Image (tube, helix red, strand yellow):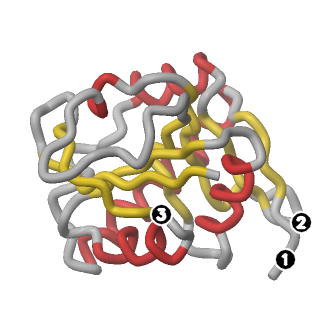
Amino acid sequence: MENLHIRKAVKADTPRLKEIFAVARQFMVETGNPTQWTDGYPSDELLQADIDSGDCYTIANDGEHIVATFVLRPGDDPTYSTIYGGAWLSNRPYATIHRIASSGETKGIFAAAMEFAMNRYNSIRIDTHRDNTVMQRAIVKAGFTYCGIIHCWNGSERLAYQKDF
């Protein structure tokens, strides 16, 4: 696997990140998940807010070509305050992974993002759409435990996972 470099995203990365999200949306459709990221999600405003907050990261290959992005946000996530059909592994302080997306050009993206997160936080939470079986497999393979159902800001259901170290 080629050497991957992770850094905070900057505004100049926006066009490339939008390209990556477009590829990820198409991949979701092709793999049986057509309803998770619709209507151009994430919006330009949300992407800019992620960059401005310092929570958006890029993953680049050896040539510094950006091949993926993700959000790593420390602190309580309001959509995780109530969980149905289960319970969180712990109530320890945690960070949340959101909007992980890849251009499909490089393998090992999820593992690289998880290693980056785990080197910074002792508890990580993540969620995904019920139809996103590709992401569910990656989450479980990375050692996360299924904890239950949460509802996003728009009320849609997500499968929620946690990993403590």
Query: Could you tell me how far apart the alpha carbons at marks 2 and 1 are, in whole angstroms?
Result: 7 Å
What residue is pinned by disc 3? 144
Observer-nearest of 119 and 109 = 119
Mark 3 packing: few (<14 Cα in 10 Å), some, or many (20+)? some
Mark 1 packing: few (<14 Cα in 10 Å), some, or many (20+)? few
Left or right: residue 156 compared with residue 105: left
Left or right: residue 16 compared with residue 141: right
| Marks 2 & 1, CB-CB < 8 Å contact | yes
Q: Nearer the viewer, mark 2 or mark 3?
A: 3
Residue 165 location, x and y as percent?
65, 52
Left or right: residue 20 compared with residue 29: right
Q: Amino acid at mark 3?
A: Phe
* Element carrying mark 1: loop
Q: Amino acid at mark 1?
A: Glu
Please give the count of numbered marks on the rendered protein. 3
Query: Could you tell me how far apart the alpha carbons at marks 2 and 3 are, in whole angstroms?
Result: 28 Å
Q: Amino acid at mark 2?
A: Asp
Tag of residue 62 = 2
| Marks 2 & 3, CB-CB < 8 Å contact | no
Residue at figure coordinates x 33%, y 62% from the top left: 146
What residue is pinned by disc 1? 2
